[in-house]
Image: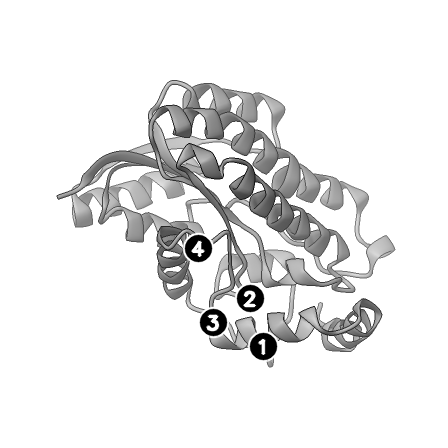
Amino acid sequence: MKEIKTVLITGASSGLGEAFSHLLAQSFQQIILVARNEQTLLTLARELQKSYGVDVICWPHDLTSEEDLNALIHKIKSHKISLLINNAGEGVYGEFHQVAYERYHHLVELNISALTALNYAAIPEIIANHGMGIINIASLAALQPLPFMAVYTASKSYVLHLSAALNEEYSHSGISIMALCPGFIQTPFIAKAAINTQGFPLADPYSVAAQGWNAFIAKKSVYIPGRQNALLALLIRFTPRKLAAKIAFYLMRKRG
């Protein structure tokens, strides 16, 4: 029997967000899809309704627009949200000073500012609704400095630490807040960030979503999907930061 609960997913139109949409349509009664492209959202909504019989609401919003973000926050307060998945995000590859500053500004607005605002708005609502919590999508790259993607990795480090801190802060409230830290995933994110991933394993978004959901149910505060990624995270933990950055430099140069 489906739960009479609502999940809101940002960045829902493709990649990991789309994978979460299909996964959670099997256990939630209502799904709210948020992304910029309304037509893509409507196509996904029809697919979910046909396949799972779930109620789907489409909210086309650009989270880097203050007006759109405020509109979304207002809607969150008028719906009984049980779970928020903050998946919207972007990456930028390139030598730091060669990338247009506007791209960094946009990245920070989306990866940090919008995510923080949505956590701030959703937490009291989820608690009041006796809901489940929040999954914030961070990255394996959050664990170390990554030359040529410095701003992106810094933004995901923020997401990681924010999530871990909030999970502890609200542990008494009955909700969980988890940072999901995947490695490279086979999604449109790769092309948009202009990264050459040759030689790197690309995970299936549906597998990552399933692993992440199981970890959230198990009350993990941070989860790294994939054995290779978990091993890499362990190695990073015991590698001096300067050495880790130097190794990453040689791995990431000429990836554009």
Say left or right for 71 vs 20.
Answer: right
Mark number for residue 136? none
Say left or right for 7 vs 159.
Answer: left
**CB atoms of marks 3 and 2 within 8 Å:** yes
Label 2: which residue? 183
**CB atoms of marks 2 and 1 within 8 Å:** yes
Q: Residues within 10 Å of mark 2 (few under 14, many from 20)?
A: many
Q: Quadrant of the N terminus?
A: top left
Q: Quadrant of the C terminus?
A: bottom right
The amino acid on which the numbered mark 1 sits, given as a three-letter code, is: Phe
Residue 43: x, y in percent?
31, 44
Classify residue 39 by image quadrant.
top left
The amino acid on which the numbered mark 2 sits, given as a three-letter code, is: Gly
State how far apart marks 1 and 3 are (Cα): 13 Å
State how far apart marks 2 and 1 are (Cα): 9 Å
| Residue 9 visible to an observer of this rendering | no
State how far apart marks 3 and 2 are (Cα): 8 Å
Say left or right for 202 vs 7.
Answer: right
State how far apart marks 2 and 4 are (Cα): 12 Å
Residue in front for this viewpoint, 197 or 175: 175
Label 1: which residue? 200
| Residue 101 visible to an observer of this rendering | yes
Mark number for residue 16? 4
Residue 75: x, y in percent?
42, 21
Classify residue 97 by image quadrant.
bottom right
